[in-house]
Amino acid sequence: MISVELALRLRTAGLEWSPASGDRFVIPDRGMDTEIFVVSQLTVDVHDAPTGRLLRFNGTTEWALDSVEQEAVVWLPWEGQLRDALGPRFRRLEPLGDGFAVVIGGPDGEQRHIDVDAERAYARALLTTLHS
């Protein structure tokens, strides 16, 4: 799984998120930085309110949290979402001894982005495409 720091870098670089069932996110800076939430029609659903998109918590009677604005959460995209965001630039995922390399095509040929986790390698590759 990608780190919150890496997810924040993706958001800052311009990766847009339209919340969908199965998406993971965290709520930073509220004492819940390590709690991973998943959008689900049974627990967390997306509601378009006049003030913006809300992630609503259903059936969480033990919490004092009914909803949170989308801008207040950090999306943790999974491998397939990151690969899709790379689009036609994605060439391949290569296993390495202690990690993975994501190979993307660019104007100067292929680039390899390496990390210990496949999702993190995809995120690092995507960061370079969002900056270009």
Image (cartoon, rainbow, N blue to C red):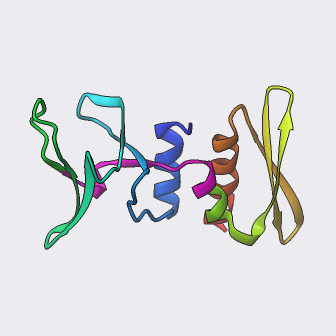
Is 18 one of the magenta-colored residues?
Answer: no
Quarter of the picture containing the C terminus is bottom right
Looking at the picture, does residue 103 appear above or below residue 53? above
| Image location of residue 17, percent across then percent down | 43, 62
The residue sitting at 46% across, 65% down in the picture is 16
Residue positioned 29% across, 56% down in the render: 71
**How many numbered tags mark residues here?**
0
Residue 91 x, y percent position in the rendering: 83, 61
Question: Magenta stretch?
Answer: 68-81
Does residue 83 lie above or below 58 as drawn? below
Relative to 112, is 81 on the left or the right?
Answer: left
Find the residue positioned furthest to the front: 42
Image x and y of residue 124, in percent = 66, 48
The residue lying toward the viewer, choosing from 94 and 73, is 94
Q: Nearer the viewer, residue 119 or 106?
A: 119
Q: Is residue 20 left or right of residue 123?
A: left
Q: Position of residue 105 (x, y in %)?
A: 83, 65
* Residue located 26% across and 45% down the image: 43
Q: Residue at x 52, y 54 (%)?
A: 10
Instruction: Say which quarter of the image contains residue 53.
Output: bottom left
Instruction: For the N terminus, give its image quadrant.
Output: top right
Q: Is residue 85 left or right of residue 7?
A: right
